[in-house]
Image: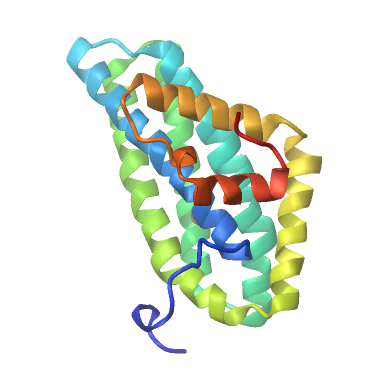
Amino acid sequence: MPCADHLPPVDLSRVSATSILSGEHRVILQVLDVVEKLAALALRDQRIPSEHASQALEVLAKFADRCHHGKEETVLFPVLEAIQPGFSPVQMMRAEHVESRAFIRAMTEAVAAGDAASYARAANGYVDLLRQHIHKEDDILFRFAGQMLTPAQDAEVLDGYRRIEHDDMGDGTHERLLGIADTLATTYGVPRASDSQQIMDLLTAICGCKKD
Ligand SMILES: [Fe+2]
Ligand SMILES: [Fe+2]
C-alpha cells in the first residue's frame, strides 16, 4: 500500500462511502467553530451561553457521534477490517471516538452545573481532538479506504448508511440537526457547510432531505 500522500483525495463530486462522511465532516467542523466561540465567551463572561451550548451539544451527540461515528463504527470500519484484519488506522479512530464521548459528557455536565471553566476546558479539548481526528480521516484513512473498497463494497456501505439514517436516527432527524447547526453558524458568524451545493448534495444524498 503506498503512503497516503500518494493516494488521490476523497472525490466530493460523487456519492461514495467516503465522500458522504467527508461531507458530514464539513458540518461537524462548522459546529466546532461555533463551540470554540462558545468556550471563549464562557471564559470571558464566566457564564456559559447555555441555550446555544445545549443546542451545539445536541448536534454533537446525535449528528457527530450517534449518526456520523455510528456510520463509521458499525458500517465502514467493519468492512475495512474485514478486508485488512487489524487495520491500525481504524483502531486509532475508534479510540478517538471513545475519547470524544468523554468530552461530550464533560461538556454536558458542565452546562448542567453552570461551571464555565469546566465547560471551556472540555469544549476546547473536544474541538482540538475532533479537528485532528477529521484531518486524519479525510487525509489518511479515507484515501486508503478509497483504494480498498470495490464498487460492490462501496454500494454495500452506502446501504448501511441509509439504514442508520432511516431506522436508527428516524426520518427528519438529520434535517432538523442540520438546521440547528446552520442557525448556530449564522448566529456566531461561522461559514455554513450547506452553502456549498457540492456539500449539500452529499448531505442530502442519503437522507433525502432538502435545504429550503
Ligand atoms: Fe471518526
Ligand atoms: Fe468522521
Q: Position of residue 164 (x, y in %)?
A: 74, 47
Residue 144 falls left or right of residue 121: right
Percent of width and height locating residue 54: 48, 19
Q: Residue furthest bottom?
A: 1
Q: In the rendered image, which quarter is residue 65 located in?
A: top right
Q: Quadrant of residue 66?
A: top right
Q: Position of residue 143 (x, y in %)?
A: 47, 73
Seen from the viewer's position, the closer of residues 146 and 210 is: 210
Q: Residue at x 39, y 67 (%)?
A: 139
- Residue 162 in view of the camera: yes
> Residue shown at 59%/64% (left/top)?
14
Image quadrant holding the C terminus, namely top right
- Determine whether 109 is above or below 164 in the image: above
What x and y, as percent, mark residue 141? 47, 69
Indicate left or right for 21 with 100 as reference: right
The way the protein has been coloured in the rendering is: rainbow
Left or right of 175, for residue 199: left
Label total for image: 0
Residue 21 vertical placement versus 207 (above, below): below
The residue depicted at 28 percent of the width and 26 percent of the height is: 37
Q: Residue at x 72, y 42 (%)?
A: 208
Q: In this picture, is 178 found above or below 13? A: above
In-front residue for pair 104/189? 189
Name which quarter of the figure residue 185 lies in: top left
Residue 57 makes an appearance in the image: no
